[in-house]
Image (tube, rainbow, N blue to C red):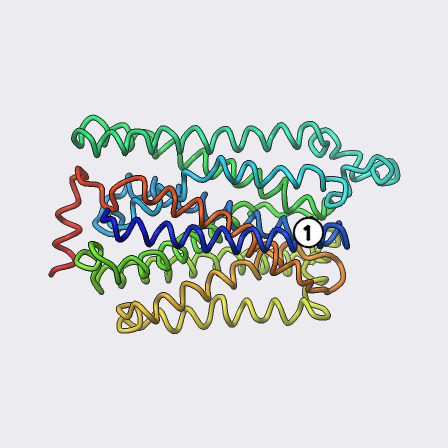
Amino acid sequence: MTPELVADFDRFSRRALTIGVAGLALCALGWVMNPAQFYRSYLVGFLFWNGVALGCMAIAFLHQLSGGAWGVVIRRILESASRTFPLTLVLFLPLIFGIHSLYIWSRPEAVAHDHILQHKVAYLNVPFFLGRAALYFAIWITISYFFNKWSLAQDRTAAEPWLTKMQLLSGPGLLLYGATVTFSSIDWVMSLEPHWFSTIYGILFIGGQGVSALAFVIAVIVLLASRPPMLEVITDKHLRDLGTLLFAFIMLWAYFNFSQFLLIWAGNLPTEIPWYLRRMQGGWKWVGLSLVLFHFVLPFLLLLSRQFKRNPKWLGMMAGWVICMRIVDLLWLSAPGGFSVHWLDVAAPVGLGGIWVAAFFWQLKQRPLLPVHDPQLEEALEHGRD
């Protein structure tokens, strides 16, 4: 970590923080003008940036279990993102005040006249909802804390016994990640329309978070690859590997979404099909079509090219594009009944993103950019030189 790079990170943090404060100031104005829209847009922004942190943590666990040179050069980025959960917990707090605005099941007068909500009241009630949210964050913060603690200890001493501890944590960590993401997606998004349900809803979010995390990691690694000392470390082969991983996760995201659509469309049940019918009419139809074309087809075709994945500028632009489409996807998933796109749908993700990115770069500068005692470090460096 050179002094020049630390200065760059400080500059990035200041700029991101300025953008974040400005965006949140606009959000505050939006809350005064239209509280219901504010909470809806804020939820989308929170889901995306919390999802980036979750996806990075899951990929860090996956690398510990699978090994390979591909994860060594991005390990510090993944770990830095996973240390932002205390911040995302704070960013979650405004949503507590919007529960009655967002979720119809939280309104006693609505539950009293809806027999379906009455059957779900044991699970969908405000105290239990908040208790589950606290449990999710407790799990995420705890497993991230120990993983990062042992990673730092490995830097200061040697690979063992810290490598073994991280690997032993990664297996249960992935299981806890899958369970908490599944239940949190049901709580925070699927319960926006409590009459509808999907048995693979959590898988959609797991795939989406993988895409979001990899796109963010690629954007950061492209930024670092033009600056010493990472200029001598990151090569086009590392970029190609990350581009291939992004390609794979986009394929998984598309597969999960198409699987849900196919099963619900073929079943044609009145309890399930209206969710898609609302999103295939009016303006939401064009949003859904744009997701097919620009979240899947365009990245799929471009990432097939080895030359495209080896070009830092092109790959970085693709990562930025995918990040934008991920926000559109979350907007589509949480779409209200009628089509409307509000300026808060931009201000909230940008404002929350500015705060989160500032915290991320502050975390990134705390440790060396490469894990110096990782047993696969030399393999990762040689892989880039071959």
Residue 244, image quadrant: bottom left
Q: Is residue 147 left or right of residue 272?
A: left
Residue 276 position, x and y percent, is: 67, 60
Task: Please say if 246 is above or below 9.
Answer: below
Q: Nearer the viewer, residue 30 or 310?
A: 30
Q: Residue at x 73, y 65 (%)?
A: 339
Q: Which residue is mark 1?
A: 40
Q: Is residue 287 left or right of residue 370?
A: right
Q: Residues within 10 Å of mark 1 (few under 14, many from 20)?
A: many
Q: Is residue 223 left or right of residue 326?
A: left
Task: Please say if 262 is above or below 126.
Answer: below
Residue 81, image quadrant: top left
Query: Is residue 71 in view?
Result: yes
Residue 343 position, x and y percent, is: 66, 63
Q: Residue at x 44, y 51 (%)?
A: 14
Q: Residue at x 31, y 72 (%)?
A: 308
Residue 95 position, x and y percent, is: 66, 41
Residue 111 position, x and y percent, is: 83, 37
Task: Tell me the kind of residue under disc 1.
Answer: Arg
Q: Nearer the viewer, residue 186 or 367?
A: 367
